[in-house]
Amino acid sequence: MSTTTMLACGDEFAQLFRHDNFIVIVAITFGCLIGMVGIVGSTLSTVLRTRAKEQTKRELAAYVAEGTLDADKAVEMLNAGMTKWARGDVPGWDKKA
């Protein structure tokens, strides 16, 4: 690259920084990037949490199948950290409906 081309390129960047909407464009760009990172992170977290739950269910089912764990105890272990709503123990809510 010649010196004239480099100066012209540097001059274009200088004009870009002086543009009235430069701060707005940078703010919107970073806001969108932060939003996308948040969405991807949340999705990844949900996928990993679901995988762990399913792995636990498979392991407990294997223990019940080989007879080293009682089925009722396995159900208790699965429901241990769940809220009433997730278990379906909400008063007045019919599970069959």
Image (tube, rainbow, N blue to C red):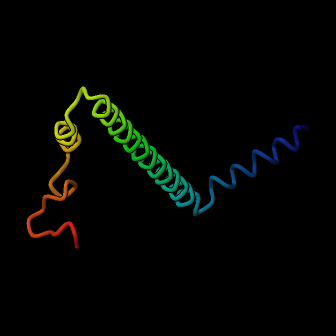
Residue under the point 69% across and 50% down: 14
The quadrant in which the C terminus is found is: bottom left
Q: Quadrant of residue 4?
A: top right
Is the residue 93 above or below the residue 74 in the image?
below
- 9 relative position to 94: left or right: right
- 35 relative position to 75: left or right: right
Residue under the point 38% across and 45% down: 50
Labels in figure, total: 0
x, y percent for residue 52: 37, 37
Residue under the point 75% across and 45% down: 10
Is the residue 51 above or below the residue 94 in the image?
above
Q: Which is more toward the observer, 10 or 68?
A: 68
x, y percent for residue 73: 17, 36
The quadrant in which the N terminus is found is: top right
Is the residue 11 above or below the residue 52 in the image?
below
x, y percent for residue 40: 48, 48
Q: Which is more toward the observer, 65 or 92?
A: 65
x, y percent for residue 26: 55, 54
